[in-house]
Amino acid sequence: MESHLTPLELILLPHLNRLLSSRKYPKTICPSECARALSADELEASGVSSWRDLMPQVREILWDMRQRGEVEIMQKGVPVADDIGLQNIKGPIRARRLKR
């Protein structure tokens, strides 16, 4: 992992990458799958008591991955347009690796 990552990213990214890699295109993951995958020790190290508290950060990390061209963010089964920012997203999202 790169050294510029935050401690929280160092915890969440391996889970996100494992989940994303486990799904063949066009299958998707729900961000909550990542948050729910954390152990009690990882939750404690993240400074939270519940996986739900991590949902904003998981969504932010997925959005960063999208901006780097690593994933596609879906809503209602449709890719979210590139000009839509995370702050404009209401409701559930899903993510998948880009088709290569």
Image (cartoon, rainbow, N blue to C red):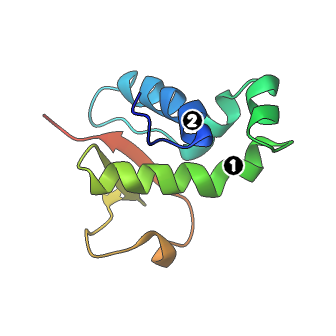
Query: Above or below — where is 25 with respect to 63?
Result: above
Along the horizontal axis of the image, is 6 left or right of 99? right
Q: According to the image, label 2 marks what residue?
A: 12
Residue toward you, 49 or 4: 4
Task: Place residue 67 in its image quadrant.
Answer: bottom left
Q: Nearer the viewer, residue 44 or 32?
A: 44
Q: Is residue 61 left or right of residue 45?
A: left
x and y percentages locating residue 61 in the rendered image: 48, 50
- The residue at the point 45 percent across, 23 percent down is 18
What residue sits 32% from the left and 53% below the top? Answer: 66
Nearest the eye: 83 or 46: 46
| Residue type indicated by callout 2 | Leu
Height in image: 34 above or below 95? above
Tags 1 and 2 touching, CB below 8 Å: yes
Circle 2 residues within 10 Å: few <14, some 14–19, many ≥20: many
**Amino acid type of the residue tagged 1 in the rendering:** Leu
The image quarter containing residue 42 is top right
Identify the residue position indicated by label 1 in the image.
54
Tell me the distance, in whole angstroms, between the alpha carbons under discs 1 and 2: 9 Å
Q: Secondary structure at mark 2?
A: helix
Q: Tell me the quadrant of the picture where the N terminus can be found.
A: top left
